[in-house]
Image (cartoon, rainbow, N blue to C red):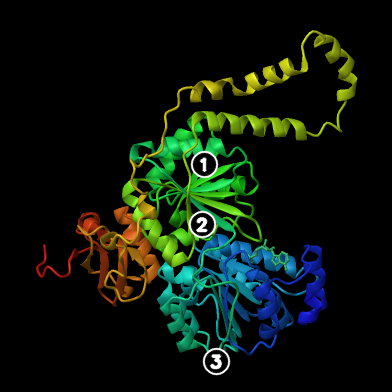
Amino acid sequence: MTFEGLGIDERLIRATTELGYVNPTAIQEQAIPVLLSGTTDFIGLAQTGTGKTAAFGLPLLHVIDAAAKYPQALVVCPTRELCLQIVKEIELFKKYMTGVSVVAVYGGSSIGLQIRDLKRGVQIVVATPGRLIDLIERKAINLEQIKYVVLDEADEMLNMGFQDDIEFILKNTPQRDSTWLFSATMPPEIRKVSKRYMKDPKEVTVGKVNMANKSIDHQYYLTTAQHRYETLKRIIDFNPGIYGIIFTRTKIDAQEISEKLTREGYDIDALHGDLTQGQRDKVMGQFRDKSLQLLIATDVAARGIDVQGITHVINYELPDDVEVYTHRSGRTGRAGNQGICISIIHAKEAYKLKQIERINNSQFHKLDIPSGKDVCRKQFFHFMDKLLSTDISHGDYETYVPMLAERFADVSKEDVLKRVAAMEFDRFLKYYENAEDLNLRDKGRREPAERGGDRSSTRERDGGRGDGRKEYSRGGSGGGYSRLFVNLGTKDGFFKASFLQFILDMSDLKKEALGRIDMKDMNSWIEIEKGAAQQMIRSLDGKNYKGRRIRMNDADSGGRR
Ligand code: AMP
């Protein structure tokens, strides 16, 4: 199949040919002919990296009216990074089309400038939900004439708490001719949205939904909690050509590990919620152009990051949510490449592997943490490969050869190689000379992940939310949720996403601690892990919000505090 055969505009074919696209990908082949009609609703279930952006971007450019200078197409996606990525790709596709404008609107940057951009007469708006609603409320964008709405990474948007916002957007686009929804998975909430707002959608699945990407090798290393950091270092050292993302649960971990590794000479920087937009852009820029080899990030900060060529994803700790694992590992093994997802775990976490295996239908491989010797050997051969593949065709090296030959007349080739190796490796060899065994050795028993269903620990539950979201059971004791009441609601100017961000920022808790959030005009109810409830209450109760005193208490304990 070719792009011509799919029926898209010749100017778009010219642009994609220049980009090196020869054949459409599976999702493009199935989506483009449907979307070109402009009137058929569409659901595309496909992982990132399958060419989704072109699958909707090309048809959008084909169907919009370049002569009409108002927003006709709206692409909604979960994050700023994805928003910019989509705009960048659409800009490339429209290279030979005149009079077509596309604009990105997202939170965290000047709304004034974005309003000005919108006024220029754009046809395609690519937006994150929160900022879009802000713009709708300010009447800076008119959705009356929007004909096409694309929801990209719909499951990710729902994970982030944007469900109400999405429904709001769909309700406010009354002239919609068609809705195009793309998602990696199909949780019940998305099914609900599609039933409510879409008409006989044509549904297409590329690969298997809910299945982990087969091009990823899932590996794990078993160690003790206090050896986690050393193990991480050893993994990095054992993979000299690594270009990877390390995930931590907390921003403090991300920051501390990044600082420690930097001090020890590693090429790494951290990405977390405490950075300013400018700092974030700088780190991402360096990582993207590979002047930074490693990025360490929290899940929230890394959302939507789309970087090609990631060789390894490393879970410094396993996440609590299976879907988070899938999202993390999905950063590697993209666009036909192979990738490796490594998890560093200690014995108590091993049951989680079983759950991930079952839900993702993937298999973990247990590897031994390399010994100091293994690391040195690997580094040595990597260096020798580099030496052998160094390009010496440029430069005047030939002119130095006679001089070098004279200088090295009494030194054998073997000795030269040994000296080069020593120069490069002495520090390494010394460091690893007496390196300890970091593996947690299981004395005669099977590894926990290989044991058959340990019923109490591998049970799944959905936290009583009844929303089908999968979580690990928390080993029996201390599990479960509390429900908190708070006297803040939509009347205070919050949408679910901004409210979620607000309570997380105030409490310094992570999103994973939260369950369902119910917002009403004046009050809200928050489900939160029992162990985290007091921290949330302490952080918010009695504080001020826009001059009003926040009241927060356990909703089910009856009394006010
Ligand atoms: P996406 O799933 O949209 O993030 O795309 C993944 C990557 O594949 C992007 O870098 C695209 O530029 C690239 N890509 C998309 N479609 C094609 C195609 N038909 N041929 C080759 N590369 C493609």
Residue ID for mark 1? 269
Label 3: state its secondary structure: loop
Badge nearest the viewer, 2 or 1: 2
- Foreground: 378 or 319? 378
Q: Which mark is residue 329?
A: 2
**67 or 53: nearer the viewer:** 53
Q: Residue at x 34, y 37 (%)?
A: 226
Quarter of the image where the C terminus is located: bottom left
Spot the residue most to the bottom. 200
Residue type (three-letter) at the residue carrying disc 2: Ser
- Is the C-beta of the residue carrying label 3 under 8 Å from the nearest atom of ligand 1? no
Dot 2 or dot 1, earlier in sequence? 1
Outermost left residue: 559
Q: Position of residue 106 (x, y in %)?
A: 53, 65
Q: Amino acid at mark 1?
A: Asp
Q: CA distance from mark 1 to mark 3?
A: 47 Å
Say which quadrant the N terminus sits in: bottom right
Task: Tell which circle, 1 or 3, labels the residue nearer the N-terminal end.
Answer: 3
Report the residue marked by disc 3. 200
Q: What x and y, as percent, mark residue 461?
A: 30, 69
Task: List x then y, in percent, for residue 421.
Answer: 66, 22
